[in-house]
Amino acid sequence: MQYRVLASVGCAAAIAFAQPVVYLAQEASKAAEVLTRTRKAIGGGRIDALKTFALQSSVQRNVGSIQLDSDVEIYLELPDKYARVESTRGGAVLLSGGGATGFNGDRPLQNVAAGGAAGGLVIRMGGGGPMPGGPTEKPTPEQRQQMTQVALRSARLEASRLMLGWFAMAHPAAHADYGYLGEAESVEGKAWVVEVHNGDGLAARLFVDEETNLPLMISYKAPQPRVVTSNAMAPAGGHAMVASGDAGRQPLDAQREEPVMADYTLYFEEWRDADGVRFPFRMRRAMGGTTIEEWTVSKIKFNPKIDAKTFAVDSGS
């Protein structure tokens, strides 16, 4: 089964794979067997020798009527570093707290108390004005500590979700456990289902194509994106949108509200040979069956030399 066939039938196939899971006893040995087979299909010894990784991609994000085109670079340095650098292209859309997000050891790269998003993405439409959590609403030391921990946790979750689809492994910093759940079946074929979790919020299911041994997708739960309207943030009906993939991505006032959880699926498609491994050059993220994010990867580099400044921690974080 080719994953492009699954993608072409859209939501129906996603539901078919997500629902009919035959639950078996948790089998660590079976999970290890599936993951070993998957890593071999992706790159064998190259995956075992993974130390650093770099990716360049364009990303189109859609939440409601808002569309955002970005250039994204991702850097990994195992066992404890991850950086994501995103810049928008065109329009009057700005990302709050620009520069790199991610983590270096147990510290986030971004100073969330200086106007940055607490582990997430704040999109500002229109003109200027202070952002919530800015100079007019400074966080207390306790809030700052909480925001820092949320940013760290959020970055670790996203790094692990991506790495599960790329390399059939969570980020080492997640200290994840793996269990075999069984098989999922659709008219296109069958997939092994591996559950991945830890004690810090990581809970995902990795679906691996039984024919190709390549990752098809991961499924997980996370808060829905939230749109916050503020006259101080944009003129005449402008909107500030907080696209949250994890709790704590809202400004301080919005963080007091309980997030609405949603089902997400991250698809890994168009696998190609590149730099000695196989890699998905197209990715899609869907929320409740609707695509909200599309990645088109232009370049990857396996075990490159990465400038230490890439993982520099903000002195205020």
Image: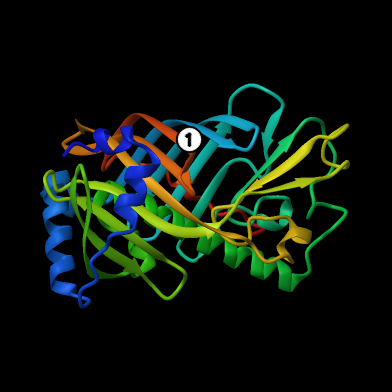
Residue under the image location 45 percent in, 54 percent down: 158
Residue under the image location 74 percent in, 59 percent down: 254
Local crowd size for mark 1, using a 10 Å CA cut-off: few (<14), some (14–19), many (≥20): some
* Coordinates of residue 116 in the picture (x, y in percent): 67, 50
- Please tell me how many numbered marks the rendered image carries: 1
* Coordinates of residue 244 in the picture (x, y in percent): 59, 52
Up-down: is 201 above or below 254? below
Q: Nearer the viewer, residue 292 or 124?
A: 292
Q: Is residue 300 visible?
A: yes
* Coordinates of residue 86 in the picture (x, y in percent): 54, 37
Residue under the image location 32 percent in, 66 percent down: 196
Q: Amino acid at mark 1?
A: Val
Q: Which residue is mark 1?
A: 72
Q: Quadrant of residue 219?
A: bottom left
Quarter of the image where the C terminus is located: bottom right
Q: Secondary structure at mark 1?
A: strand
Q: Is residue 155 left or right of residue 252?
A: left
Q: Nearer the viewer, residue 13 or 300?
A: 13
Q: Quadrant of residue 111?
A: bottom right
Q: Is residue 195 left or right of residue 99?
A: left
Up-down: is 233 above or below 67? below
Q: Nearer the viewer, residue 199 or 192?
A: 192
Up-down: is 75 above or below 202? above
Residue under the image location 56 percent in, 35 percent down: 62
